[in-house]
Amino acid sequence: PMISMKCYNEYSKKMEEPNNPAYLMGHKTDNHIEEDVDDLLRQLTPSEAFHYAYTTNNVRMAEGLLEYCRDQPFEFFFNKLCALATLGSKKAQKELEKYIEGEIATASLTTITEAIGALVTCYNRQDSEKEHIDSMEDIFEKALEQAKTNKERASILNQKGRLLAGAQEYIAAQTIADKVIELNDEEPSYFYN
């Protein structure tokens, strides 16, 4: 059952108290994480609990809650997986990489683009862009083959440029940034990324 916003806010305050074990999450063992997940699930639905962990940047707790969200419709689960990857979660990263490698030929371009953006952000958070340039190249190329409009191509290439800039390959990133603007000069963020 859904809980009221009042209950959610009260739980949020409780979780932020310095004497609350969840406040010290970074110093916990996996058993303690599981206990906190169980406690959270007694008070919130899996989706609400995941949202709480995500919005408080509690990656380990969100990773523990991800399994409880697998029975949701694919697009809801996938959205959570991408969101968790943007926080730098290695667990979400590995799952997204596996998904994108296996499904790139059949998944929608929207799904692929969302996964690419989440992975690039994940690599950025981990400062591991250089390590992933080669593995992402094939994914970028396949996504570009599926793109039908300049707007779609620009979105994909923008992610590639972000990856290259993060890897300190500035000349290649600048070349791509120029191409992105040429493809879609109506998106303001392309002038600043």
Image: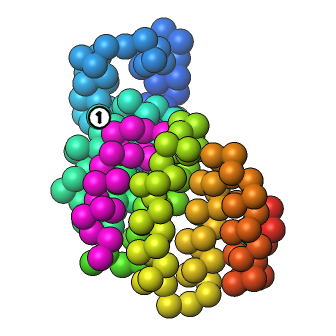
Membership of 58 in magenta stretch = no
Q: Amino acid at mark 1?
A: Gly
Point out the residue furthest to the left here: 71
Does 64 appear above or below 174?
A: above
Does 178 appear above or below 58?
A: below
**Number of dots carrying numbers:** 1
Q: What's drawn in magenta, residue-wise?
A: 83-105
- Picture residue at 70% right of the left edge, 75% below the top: 180
- Picture residue at 48% right of the left edge, 68% below the top: 140
Q: Is residue 33 left or right of residue 90?
A: left
Does 10 appear above or below 155?
A: above
Image coordinates of residue 62 in percent, x first then y, are 37, 38
Residue 101 visible somewhere in the drawing: yes
- Picture residue at 28% right of the left edge, 54% below the top: 98
Q: Is residue 76 left or right of residue 55?
A: left
Q: Quadrant of residue 181?
A: bottom right
Magenta stretch: helix, strand or loop mostly: helix
Q: Quadrant of residue 20?
A: top left
Point out the residue furthest to the top here: 19
Residue 193 visible somewhere in the drawing: no
Q: Is residue 71 left or right of residue 16?
A: left
Q: Which residue is mark 1?
A: 64
* Between 145 and 156, the one nearer to me in the picture: 145
Membership of 97 in magenta stretch = yes
Image coordinates of residue 164 in percent, x first then y, are 63, 54
- Quadrant assignment for the C terminus: bottom right
Image coordinates of residue 1 in percent, x first then y, are 25, 50
How is the structure coloured here? rainbow
Image coordinates of residue 109 in percent, x first then y, are 42, 78
Does 106 appear above or below 115?
A: below
Secondary structure beneath label 1:
helix
Q: Is residue 135 left or right of residue 39?
A: right
